[in-house]
Amino acid sequence: MDKNALNDFANRLAKGGRGAGVGLGFLAAAGGLAYTMFQSMYTVDGGHRAIIFSRIGGIQPDIYREGLHLRIPWFHYPIIYDIRARPRKISSPTGSKDLQMVNISLRVLSRPDSAQLPTIYRQLGVDYDERVLPSICNEVLKSVVAKFNASQLITQRQQVSLLVRKELIDRARDFNIILDDVAITELTFGKEYTAAVEAKQIAQQEAQRAQYIVEKAKQERQQKVVQAEGEAAAAKMIGTAISKNPGYLKLKKIRAAQNIARTIASSKNRVYIHTGTLMLNVNDKDFDENLESQLVRGKRK
């Protein structure tokens, strides 16, 4: 190969290498700038708040709302809090005033005070609810339940719930925590107390049943007395009517004969009976003689 041709190739390669180096440097500068811009921005979602920790000054007092915000990379980094109310169920076994074991459960809606986020982070951190709520709920439940008997916890449940809510809200305010709702979701007693209550209920029901049976017997006895008095009065009236008017007995026999005839007529069988059996012999002499003899006997008595 010609020496001049080799030199010419070497010069061209050197010129191309300088151009490539400039291009790579530009790309590196552009990438560094993009990374710096990306690290300088952060987003606070809806229902959240952010505070800034500075490597120079520590926790900053400013609180940032939803949206896009700027920070100095490496020197600042955001700490984001969820300020929406979150439910939490807490159970606590405790004792009542009459020394009965009670298992009580609370449902608590809690959220941090958004104006005190820097203080909350300094004192409690991000997991503030895990650090505070179990202890203060157990403390308040034990102090409130100890003021009531086991029966009062059932009959005065609304008053117990209001007292627990008031004291728990006051205790949570000391830690810059807001409680939107406090409700008693479960209230159970020990096996011994439950068995005693059931036995008492059964005894009361049996006593009420026995009282009902006694009252029913009294009413039935009174009913029989009234019925007997009515039958005696009816018999006396019938006897008086027969003694004053002999035709009354004939009328009763005619009505009895009508009932017998109506029953026989509705039957599918054929029946042949005597008029005496049917009590239609009211025109016979025997009937009048028997009737007069009965009247004479009634007067003698």
Image (cartoon, rainbow, N blue to C red):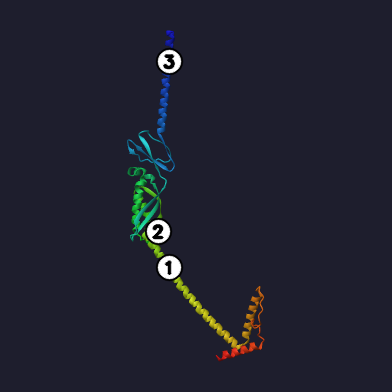
Q: Which residue is mark 3?
A: 13
Determine the residue positioned at 40% across, 42% down: 49
- Quadrant of the image containing the N terminus: top left
Percent from the top left, x then y, of residue 56? Answer: 32, 35
Figure check: 190 above or below 263: above
Q: Check the picture and name the quadrant holding the C terminus.
A: bottom right
Please name the residue that numbered disc 2 is placed on: 157
Q: Residue at x 35, y 38 (%)?
A: 53
Within 10 Å of disc 3 (Cα), the crowding (few <14, some 14-19, many 20+) is: few
Of the numbered discs 3 and 1, the one sitting upstream in the chain is 3
Residue placed under numbered mark 1 in the picture: 206
Q: CA distance from mark 3 to mark 1?
A: 113 Å
66 over 184 or under it: above or below: above
Q: Residues within 10 Å of mark 1 (few under 14, many from 20)?
A: few
Badge count? 3
Which quadrant of the figure has residue 194?
bottom left
Residue at the (42%, 18%) spot, across then down:
17
The type of residue carrying mark 2 is Arg
Badge 2 marks a residue whose secondary structure is: helix
Q: Position of residue 169 (x, y in %)?
A: 37, 52
